[in-house]
Image (tube, rainbow, N blue to C red):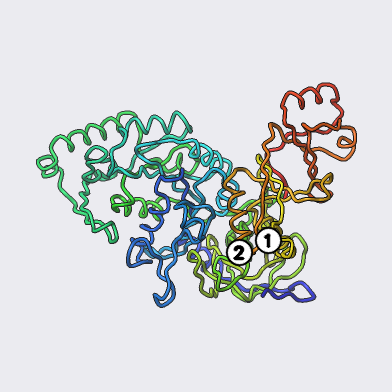
Amino acid sequence: MSETSETAPTGEASIDTGDVSYEANRRRTFAIISHPDAGKTTLTEKFLLYAGAVGEAGAVKAREGRRRSRSDWMELEQQRGISVTSTALKFDYRDHVINLLDTPGHRDFSEDTYRVLTAADAAVMVLDAAKGIEPQTLKLFEVCRAQQLPILTFLNKFDRPGRDPLELLDEIEDQIGLRPTPVTWPVGIPGSFKGVIDRRDGSFVRYSRSVRGATEAGEEIVPPKIAELEEGEDWRAAIEGCALLDEVGANLDLDSFYAGESSPLFVGSALTNFGVRHILDAIVDLAPPPHPHLDVSGKLRAITTSFSGFVFKVQANMNPAHRDHIAFLRVCSGRFERGITVVASSTGKPFTTKYATSLFGADRSTIDDAYPGDVVGLVNASELKIGETLYLGEPVRYPPIPSFAPELFATVRNLDTSRHKQFRRGLEQLTYEGVIQTFVDPLLEGQPVLGAVGQLQLEVAEHRMANEFKAPIEMRISQYQAVRKTDAPTVSALPRSSGIRIIERGQELILALFESEYWLQRLQRDHPEWTLEPIVTLDR
């Protein structure tokens, strides 16, 4: 459990700014984003394989090899084969500390992805070479752009039949406005993928498959003259493609990459391990190290100042054997030391970090210190909410992390009245984690109404209520054409109509739900004095 004391800490842990700067420069903290089925989870596992964090792809070693856990740790994720929650994985590669933040792939969980991206310094966008830009890709890119994150692109599944890579480059630039600058270029067409040309030095890397992709792919550096003899037309087509890229200036440019204008692009196949090393090396060589964060006043807090960080995610029941809560903390400045007493900015109260862990999917191990860029798991930190800032020394508060405006609503009923406490506790926990938003309908005696961005969020809530909290629920889902933020005077003046529903979250938030956009527009035209404000995000 977390521990608190009566008075706020007066001192702070001493830090060696040179040491903090050195350690921060060794960190790379990035998120992986993709459309469902683009291969994000497979690529995550192959990163762990190439970094030596696992001995065989598809499994993450736990302590003493006694257990295994995948990056998709939730039972529902493993049943459906998609990521529905984010997780953190920390490992070493090339004398660097890598903090990999795996994100949900489904658009219904774009809010969770947004929260994770606030803790990342860069992102890897995974695209299916046969499908290219898909609707969710656009949504995720908008989230990345809002966070001003540099993006690396990985064209995946090149071992299968797919589209012409030049066509995909045009699509990326046309649809998301990001100029792709290929660093590696394929030799062989999709489905007959031989290897890649590294455009930085002109070398050709030929790949050979490993059994089921469980171990690293064989890589052979082939001189251009031999490649031309052995690969024939595939080699000549690749060389022509590289020449065309040179002609249009699609070359690696770090300044535009950091500015979010261009994206270094790599080609490969996560399933067969082709090109995995190139993109992992790029995370070390090209992705930026941790940088100073802006506080709510717009002031930068240097990474060498005293410790500070913010909570970007909370999660319960990651490991059924523990049944605890974990707050995911991104370290922004200074050195974190387990056991230090820090200050929570929202309350000014002290918080002792005795139970701090390093996360590897669902597995955890005690951590003694951490540096800017690292993600720390604070166990049983039930008083810490998403967006909370913790600090030592000079006070700081980082910008809050808003929740997305819900688009789908469901009236929920407890199916087992004998488990009323579990029902309430489960809804409170899921709301606390940001899985769903909970409102009440004052006309239905305070009956809970769940708000979500999409249907799958509600399905996850239903699954977790039944399996984790043993409180099965029934949901009646309603869709509304318009949602507006309102106030008590407007509610009292609104006509009593079956096409309008009012729901509340405490005293601070009242929403009016409209079945007809036309009906809303008419009311706004006839009563401009009423408060009916459009919403994109909501304060927590």
Q: Quadrant of residue 225?
A: top left
Question: At which x and y percent is residue 267?
Answer: 32, 44
At a point 59% along the width and 59% down the height, the residue shown is 332
For the point 28% across and 52% down, the residue is 272
Residue wearing tag 2: 468
Residues at circles 2 and 1 in contact by the CB criterion of under 8 Å: yes
Left or right: 112, with 394 as reference point: left
Q: Residues within 10 Å of mark 1 (few under 14, many from 20)?
A: many
Total numbered labels: 2
Residue type, label 1: Gly
Closest to the observer, 128 or 414: 414
Q: Classify mark 2: residues with Cα within 10 Å, few (<14), some (14-19) or many (20+).
A: some
Q: Quadrant of residue 510?
A: top right
**Image mark for residue 426:** 1
Q: Residue type at mark 2: give it.
A: Glu
Nearest to the observer: residue 538 or residue 24: 538
The percent position of residue 167, horizontal first and vertical second, equals 34, 30
Residue 182 image-quadrant placement: top left
First in residue order: circle 2 vs circle 1: 1
Q: Is residue 367 left or right of residue 442?
A: left
User: Which quarter shows the N terminus?
Assistant: bottom right
In this rendering, position of residue 48 left or right of residue 474: left
User: Which of 397 and 322 lies nearest the eye of the viewer?
Assistant: 322
- Disc 2, SS: loop
Position of residue 85 in the picture relative to residue 268 (left or right): right
Q: Position of residue 169 (x, y in %)?
A: 37, 33
